[in-house]
Image: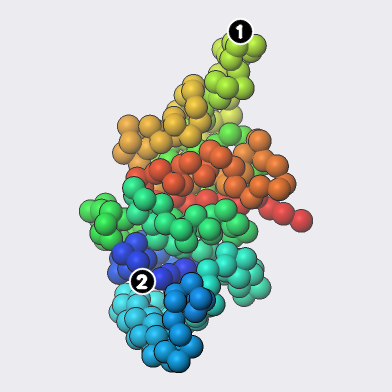
Amino acid sequence: MFRRAIVASDFSKESLALVRSSGALKGFGTEEILLLHFWGTLEVLGVDSFYKPTVYEDFEKNLQSQKTTLEKQGFKVETRVLEGLSAVQVNTIAMDEKYPLIAVGSDKYIFGAMANELIHNARTPTYIFKSSNGKPDSGTERIKEAGGAAEHVLFATDFSKNSEVAFNYLVEMVPIIKKRVTLVHVQDEYRISPYLDDRIDEFNRIDAGRLEGMKKVLLEKGCPEAETVLRYGSPSSEVLKAVKDLSADMVIMGSQGRGFVNEFFLGSVSHNVARQSPVQVLLIPAKRQ
């Protein structure tokens, strides 16, 4: 489903980690990559126009090195240099040229500016590959050797329309999930307490049923193992706790939830999870007319 992907890269440690490891893109079924590199404006770089050809030459050398690295991993690679970092440009390319996935690297502890820009304006599924000081964790190599995108996926849902879209992606991804999926819903204490506290048992019963229905779909589609988790508290905090408690190696979720307002492309829960998750995150945007 992600045969073609855009890799949004610069020469940061995080981008190099994504390129060197392929960010598990092989596991997504990716065969063709458009490697985009962003050239800052001369004013921002403080480069006199006289030196522009020399600086561009260095950029091209580094870009070709990244291309070669990806080609050695078996990808067919095209490169392109864009003036400045513009998420609008990236999304336009993805939509006009029918790339179903955008991949970007970021550090586990310091969220990169490029990743931040892209996820705030995403119109295409966006994969955030996490590394630590430019080094992928050991789980990445294990997943690559296993031949899938992830061993254990945590899918966070608030049962919004965007979550339904994201769940459809998850169902299609079942063949590349090697072990199990955990379906997580968090009862938002800020929406429930104090006025709806007396209805929490009712809400839990309804939402547990919804999770079980989703679990049934996954198992029918061949998911090796699926489980459901229902929590109460701050949604982003509880999702992040679940990632650690359950040792998930990828989070998949919609990028807009129940509180989505048209003026804002990214919901606060998905934003917080994308920034703070210690593992890879795949954000699925809402369908827009």
Q: x%, y% of residue 193?
A: 58, 15
Residue at the far right in the pictured view: 289
Q: x%, y% of residue 264?
A: 66, 47
Question: Left or right of 38: which side holds 15?
Answer: left
Image point 72% across, 46% down: which residue?
Answer: 262
Residue at the far top in the pictured view: 198
Camera-nearest residue between 154 and 211: 154
Residue 210 in sight from this viewpoint: yes
Residue 33 in sight from this viewpoint: no
Vertical arrangement, residue 119 with respect to residue 218, above or below: below
Of mark 2 and mark 1, the one earlier in the sequence is 2
Question: Left or right of 63: which side holds 85?
Answer: right
The amino acid sitting under disc 1 is: Asp
* Residue identifier under label 1: 198
Image point 58% across, 29% down: which residue?
Answer: 210
Image point 44% across, 50% down: which residue?
Answer: 281
Asked which secondary structure carries label 1, the reply is helix
